[in-house]
Image (tube, rainbow, N blue to C red):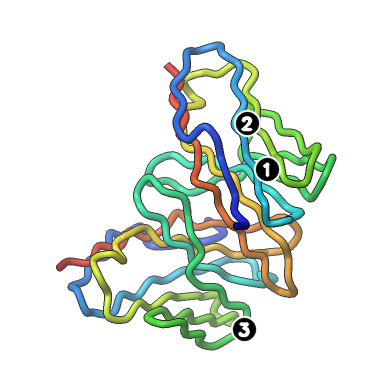
Amino acid sequence: EADIYQTPRYLVIGTGKKITLECSQTMGHDKMYWYQQDPGMELHLIHYSYGVNSTEKGDLSSESTVSRIRTEHFPLTLESARPSHTSQYLCASSIRQGALHEQFFGPGTRLTVL
Amino acid sequence: QKEVEQNSGPLSVPEGAIASLNCTYSDRGSQSFFWYRQYSGKSPELIMFIYSNGDKEDGRFTAQLNKASQYVSLLIRDSQPSDSATYLCAVYTGGFKTIFGAGTRLFVKA
């Protein structure tokens, strides 16, 4: 079944730790995205990718980095986590078909940095 | 002015009523428009999309688009308590850029 997966679903870590949030999709989509969303707030785009070896920063300044070595995999890394990184991280993918540009979201990773 | 604006709500409607959710956008070159539903603590899920002026119906949901007024709306007929969620309006403006509104919280009272 085509889907988009994120692991871990929940993560509680201490300040200064390096973490990687995993995102994989089996839909064959070229475009992938990382969003950050605080409770009750809007989604903010932090990174996106058009395809393999293509990554760009989004509108929200972020201390995270991403890589896209395989089409289906788009991990996000925080080199040194801080309490300000506490948030929900949502991965999404899309493929453009004509005028459409639907995005499909993974279940999210809720990160708490102590 | 935000690029995509929604009333944050909460919008409260009784069960069985019509819920009307509204969204305005600023980029006249916007190409396609989406409504996502997001339950508390969950990720957004797509429920409707529209890219031509007029109405588009899917079951209890109707999306309406007026490009001249830069306005898109979502009507939910026969509202159910399970419709209680935050509804995000999203606008695709080209390239990588889909702009999401902050969402309208809907409560359907049983």
Q: Secondary structure at mark 1?
A: loop
Choose between A108 and B96: the one closer to the eye: A108
Q: Amino acid at mark 1?
A: Gly
The picture quadrant where one finds residue B15 is bottom left
Q: Secondary structure at mark 2?
A: loop
Residue at mark 1:
A58
Q: Is A105 above or below relative to B56? A: above
Q: Identify the residue at horizontal 48%, vertical 59% (top origin).
A: B45
Question: Could you tell me how far apart the alpha carbons at marks 3 and 2 are, in whole angstroms?
Answer: 35 Å
Residue at mark 2:
A62
- Horizontally, residue B100 falls left or right of residue B8, namely right
Q: Please, which chain is the residue tagged with disc 2 on? A: A
Q: Amino acid at mark 3?
A: Ser
Q: Is B4 above or below relative to B68? A: above
Residue density around tag 1, few if under 14, some if 14–19, many if 20 or more, within 10 Å: some
- Horizontally, residue B86 falls left or right of residue A84, namely left
Choose between A8 and A105: the one closer to the eye: A8
Point out residue A91 in the picture as x, y percentages from the top left corner: 59, 44
Residue at mark 3:
B52
Q: Please, which chain is the residue tagged with disc 3 on? A: B
The picture quadrant where one finds residue A74 is top right
